[in-house]
Image (spheres, grey):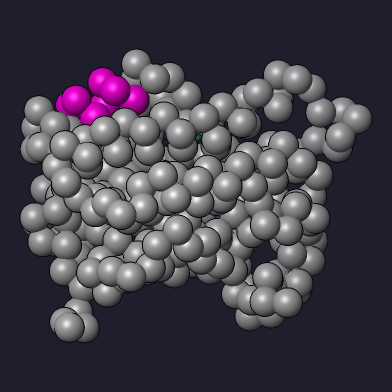
Amino acid sequence: MAVHISLEDRIAAVTGAGGGMGRAVALALAEAGARVAALDLDGESAAQITEEIRATGRPALAVPVDVTRRASVHLAFERIETSWGIPQILVTCAGIIGTARLLALTEEEWDRVLAVNLKGTFLCVQRAVEGMSRLGEGRIVTIASDTGKRGGGRIATSHYAASKGGVIAFTRSVARELAGGRIRINCVCPGPTDTPMHAALPPDLREQVARNIPLGRFARPEEIAAAVVFLVSDMASFIYGETLSVDGGVLMD
Ligand SMILES: NC(=O)c1ccc[n+]([C@@H]2O[C@H](COP(=O)([O-])OP(=O)(O)OC[C@H]3O[C@@H](n4cnc5c(N)ncnc54)[C@H](O)[C@@H]3O)[C@@H](O)[C@H]2O)c1
């Protein structure tokens, strides 16, 4: 078995590619040889990461998408298929966080977070699997969170934690459904990671969070991307329906 990772000529769709983690995932997949379609609600940041990838001599495609809307997701995949073909790889990084204690949590805020994190994951995975089934192969990594396993904890984010717990259960359920086929699906649960998502964290809270991570610091987005690239590669050919923590030891107990 080859011990290097090559995704040469693979077509990869990365949602949330304009964000901190999605950008690192897109760059790492491109470095491994994949053609990367960068999907994001923020068309400008998707275009920016696309330019960064092209500057390395690799092809890239910026595709605006709202993962909460089925029609938008379908249009985005059609654009990739028209330009390059059916994506064999999907990584769902699009996500949002919200903070509210239970009694202050509104129905609108609950729906907003669940729509992007959980429904968005469902719509993208469903559309990707449709294409991968026609192709006869595929590799999918969903992005949940350590909060989806442990149930929040650091800040009041019950809706966010519920959405991520949903992503874990959804991924495992889809893995059971797809068993016996040639589409592999796994989930990554990052711990606190240095991305724009945490830009608003007050320094004292940030320090407190870092202190509670056994490795003593936030992850770099590239460290999450490395796990994703491994999971979509042939190196992980027998890893299936797994929920992999990449959290500096937060959940080791
Ligand atoms: N940063 C962390 O500490 C951390 C920890 C665990 C899990 N995560 C998860 O990792 C994923 C990536 O987070 P990040 O830290 O890179 O955040 P980020 O805010 O940097 O990036 C998220 C991206 O998703 C995009 N997005 C938001 N709504 C969208 C929609 N409706 N359609 C398409 N794109 C949309 C945003 O435009 C943004 O580019 C998220 O699912 C997040 O919940 C992050």
Judge whether 125 appears above or below 33 on screen. above
Can you name the residue that lies furthest to the top here? 71
Q: Residue at x 29, y 37 (%)?
A: 128
Give x and y (percent) for residue 60.
16, 44
* Residue drawn where x is 19% and y is 65% of the image: 32
Percent x, y of residue 196: 54, 48
Whether residue 157 sits left or right of residue 18 in the image: it is right
Is 170 in front, or is 190? 170
Q: Residue at x 68, y 70 (%)?
A: 251
Residue 135 among magenta residues: no
The quadrant of the picture occupied by the C terminus is bottom right
Q: Is residue 49 something that shows in the picture?
A: no
The quadrant of the picture occupied by the N terminus is bottom left
Tell me: residue 69, above or below residue 102.
above
Left or right: 177, with 234 as reference point: right
Residue shown at 16%/82% (left/top)?
A: 2
User: Where are the magenta residues, as a range?
Assistant: 73-79
Prevalent SS, magenta region:
helix
Location of residue 12 in the rendering, given as x and y in whole percent from the top left corner: 23, 48
User: Where residue 46 sits in the image (x, y, percent)?
Assistant: 31, 37
Q: Residue furthest right?
A: 103
Relative to residue 87, is residue 198 drawn left or right?
right
